[in-house]
Image (tube, helix red, strand yellow):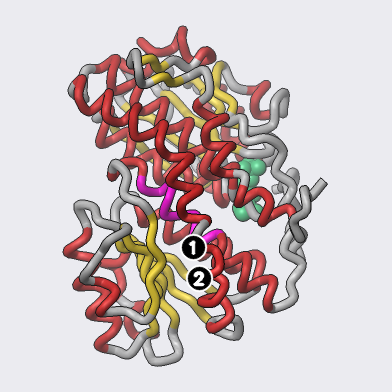
C-alpha cells in the first residue's frame, strides 16, 4: 500500500505531480478558457456580490486559507479574513446573511472547524466546504463546496492535501475574479495555462530530492529552525515550520521575513538554520536584503530560489531551485522542498514520520 516507499508521507509527497492535476481535472481547460467548479455553479453570483469572505480551518488547512487570502484579495478584490476555527467559534463573531464562509478541511471531521461552520450557519452565512474526504461531516454540513480530489492521505503530516486545497482555492478565486471582471482576459488565460503546467513543475522539484537529502543530513541535529517568506510565501514559511515540528520534533518558527527585526532576529547566530523562501517575485529585492541581515549575523541560510537565480547562491549556504511560475501559483512549487526537507530530517532522526507522537490524523475532539 505504500507503493514501494518507506512511508506514506514520502509516497504522498511524490504523488503531488499527479494529485494537483486531479484537483483540476474536468474543472479547467486552458485551450478554450474553460473553468468550472460544479458544486459552486449556483453560487457564483453570491460570491461575486460578497463584501467579505471568512475562511476557517486548523493547522495546514488554515495555512491554505492564508494563501487563499492573497489570491482572493489580489485577483477577486474581495476582503478576506482567515480565522483559526478554534478561536472563531468561541468569539462572538460579527456575521450576517451577506457573508460567505469557506471551511477548509482535509478530513472533513475536525471538531473545531465543524463547530465554526455551525455557528456561522446559525447566523445566516453561506458556507462553502473545501474538503478531501467525500461524504465527511464537514462536506455534509456545508451548503456547497468543491472536493480537493487528492486521494486518501494517510500520513499525519498533511502534504498532498495542502497543495490540493491551494489548487482548488486558486480555481475558486479565478472563477470569482472572472465573474467580477477584476482580472483581464489575458491574466485569466495566463493563469489557466500556468496552472496546467504546475504538475510538471512539481515533478521538476523532485529532481532535487537527493540534494535536499544532503542538506537534511547536515541539519539533522539542529535544535531550532526559522522559516521566512513574504507575500504568498509567508504562509508557506508557516507550513514548512509546522511540517518540521510535527514529524521531527525540532522547534521551528515561521515568520513573515520583515517581522524578523521586530524580535526574532535576536535568535540568529551561527547555530541557527534559516530557511528563506526567495523565489523571483515582487518581494524578491526585499527578501534579498532580509537574507543579508541574517548572513551578517552568521545565520546558516538555506534558500528556496527560482531556477537560474544568479544572485542568491553567492550569498547563502545552500540553495534549492524550483521552476518559475506565475507569482500567484508560487506556493504550489515552493512548499515541495520544505515537505521533503522535513521528511528527510525526521527519517534521519529515526522518527515515526507517518504517526508522530501525540498526534492523530483527524482531530475530532476540541
Ligand atoms: O483534516 P483537517 O484539514 O481539518 O485537519 C486540520 C489539522 O489538524 C491538520 O492540518 C494538521 O495540522 C496536520 N497534521 C498538519 O500536517
Q: Mark 1 = which residue? A: 208
Badge 1 element: loop
Q: Is residue 117 above or below residue 286?
A: above
- Residue 286 in picture, x, y percent from top left: 19, 65
Q: Mark 2 = which residue? A: 211
Q: Residue at x 57, y 51 (%)?
A: 59
Task: Between residue 322 and residue 99, name the one nearer to us.
Answer: 322
Q: Residue at x 25, y 88 (%)?
A: 296
* Boundaries of the magenta span: 330-339
Q: Is mark 1 within 8 Å of ligand 1?
A: no
Q: Say whether residue 115 is left or right of residue 262.
A: right
In the figure, residue 162 lies in which quadrant? top right
- Residue 181 in picture, x, y percent from top left: 21, 18
- Residue 311 in picture, x, y percent from top left: 21, 71
- Residue 114 in picture, x, y percent from top left: 64, 34
Crowding at mark 2 (Cα within 10 Å: few <14, some 14-19, many 20+) = some
Q: Say whether residue 32 is left or right of residue 213.
A: left
Q: CA distance from mark 2 to mark 1?
A: 5 Å
331 drawn magenta: yes
120 drawn magenta: no
Q: Are marks 2 and 1 in contact (CB under 8 Å)?
A: yes
Q: Residue at x 29, y 33 (%)?
A: 79
Q: Residue at x 31, y 31 (%)?
A: 191
Q: Main secondary structure of the magenta part?
A: helix
Q: Is residue 84 above or below residue 120?
A: below
Q: Say whether residue 95 is left or right of residue 280.
A: right
Q: Is residue 217 above or below residue 65?
A: below
Amino acid at each position: 500500500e505504500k507503493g514501494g516507499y518507506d512511508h506514506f508521507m514520502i509516497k504522498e509527497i511524490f504523488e503531488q505531480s499527479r494529485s494537483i492535476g486531479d484537483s483540476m481535472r474536468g474543472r479547467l481547460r486552458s485551450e478554450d478558457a474553460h473553468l468550472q467548479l460544479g458544486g459552486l455553479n449556483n453560487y457564483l453570483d453570491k460570491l461575486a456580490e460578497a463584501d467579505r469572505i471568512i475562511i476557517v480551518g486548523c493547522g495546514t488547512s488554515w495555512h491554505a486559507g492564508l494563501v487563499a487570502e492573497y489570491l482572493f484579495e489580489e485577483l477577486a478584490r474581495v476582503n478576506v479574513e482567515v480565522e483559526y476555527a478554534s478561536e472563531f467559534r468561541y468569539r462572538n463573531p460579527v456575521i450576517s446573511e451577506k457573508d460567505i464562509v469557506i471551511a477548509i478541511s482535509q478530513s472533513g471531521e475536525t471538531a473545531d472547524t465543524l463547530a465554526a461552520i455551525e455557528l456561522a450557519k446559525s447566523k445566516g452565512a453561506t458556507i462553502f466546504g473545501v474538503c478531501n474526504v467525500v461524504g465527511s461531516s464537514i462536506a455534509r454540513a456545508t451548503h456547497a463546496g468543491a472536493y480537493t480530489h487528492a486521494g486518501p492521505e494517510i500520513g499525519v503530516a498533511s502534504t498532498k492535501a495542502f497543495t490540493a486545497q491551494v489548487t482548488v482555492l486558486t480555481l475558486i478565486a479565478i472563477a470569482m475574479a472572472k465573474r467580477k471582471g477584476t482580472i483581464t482576459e489575458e491574466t485569466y488565460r495566463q493563469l489557466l495555462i500556468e496552472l496546467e503546467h504546475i504538475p510538471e513543475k512539481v515533478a521538476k522539484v523532485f529532481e532535487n530530492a537527493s540534494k535536499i537529502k544532503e542538506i537534511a543530513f547536515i541539519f539533522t541535529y539542529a535544535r531550532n529552525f526559522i522559516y521566512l517568506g513574504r507575500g504568498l510565501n509567508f504562509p508557506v514559511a508557516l507550513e514548512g515550520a509546522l511540517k518540521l515540528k510535527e514529524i521531527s520534533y525540532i522547534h521551528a518558527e515561521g515568520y513573515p521575513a520583515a517581522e524578523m527585526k521586530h524580535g526574532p532576529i535576536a535568535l540568529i547566530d551561527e547555530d541557527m538554520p534559516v530557511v528563506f523562501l526567495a523565489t523571483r517575485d515582487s518581494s524578491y529585492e526585499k527578501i534579498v536584503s532580509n537574507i543579508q541581515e541574517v548572513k551578517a549575523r552568521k545565520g546558516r541560510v538555506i534558500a528556496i530560489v527560482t531556477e537560474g537565480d544568479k544572485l542568491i547562491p553567492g550569498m547563502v549556504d545552500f540553495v534549492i531551485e524550483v521552476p518559475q511560475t506565475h507569482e500567484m501559483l508560487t506556493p504550489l512549487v515552493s512548499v515541495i522542498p520544505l515537505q521533503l526537507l522535513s521528511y528527510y530530517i525526521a527519517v534521519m532522526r529515526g522518527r515515526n514520520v507517518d504517526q508522530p507522537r501525540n498526534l492523530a490524523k483527524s482531530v475530532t475532539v476540541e
